[in-house]
Image: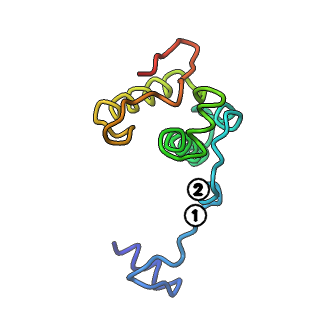
Amino acid sequence: MPKIKEHRLAKGDAYSYNWSLTIPPEFQLPFEPTHEAMASLDLHMNQRPEHLAANLRRAFSGIVAGNVKEEGIREIERKGRFKINGDTALMKRMDKLLKQFVDQQRMKLPGTKYEPCYEIITAVPVNSK
C-alpha cells in the first residue's frame, strides 16, 4: 500500500479511484464472434501473457454469444459449432473449465438442454460435452 500511495501522490491521482489506470484497446474493443474470427484466435502459450489473455477473452465472449445472443445463435445454426484451436495443454484446461460450467448449468438458459456452440480442436482430440 505505501507504494500505491506514493505513486498516486506523485501522479496527483485520487485515492478513491485509479485515474491513471490504462486498459489496452484489445481488452476494450468489441469482438464479432464469427466462425472465421473464432478459428483464427491465437490460443498458444508462446506469446505475451496479455495477448493470450485478450484472445481468451475473445474466445469466451464468442462462446457466450453462441449460447445466448441472437446473432451468435443464428451463426451457429447457419454454420455449425465454432472451432476453437490452440495449444494442447491450454485447450485441455479450457475444455475442463467449460465442462465444469456445463455441469454447474452456467452454459444454458434455465429450462433448456445445453448443446455446445463450440468444438475444441487440438493435436490430440478433446471432446466437448
Give the percent coordinates (x, y) of residue 38. Answer: 64, 35
The one nearer the camera, 63 or 8, is 63
Give the percent coordinates (x, y) of residue 32. Answer: 66, 47
Q: What residue lies at 48% left-to-right and 16% top-to-bottom?
A: 126
Identify residue type, mark 1.
Answer: Ile
Neighbourhood count class around disc 2 (C-alpha, 10 Å): few under 14, some 14–19, many 20 upward: some
Q: Mark on residue 27?
A: 2
Give the percent coordinates (x, y) of residue 1. Answer: 33, 72
Disc 2 + disc 1, Cβ < 8 Å: yes
The one nearer the camera, 97 or 17, is 97
User: Which of label 2 and label 1 is nearer to you?
Assistant: 2
Q: Is residue 6 left or right of residue 12?
A: left
Mark 2–mark 1 distance (CA, rounded to whole Å)? 7 Å
Q: Dot 2 lies on which element?
A: helix
| Residue indicated by mark 1 | 23
Q: Is residue 21 left or right of residue 32?
A: left
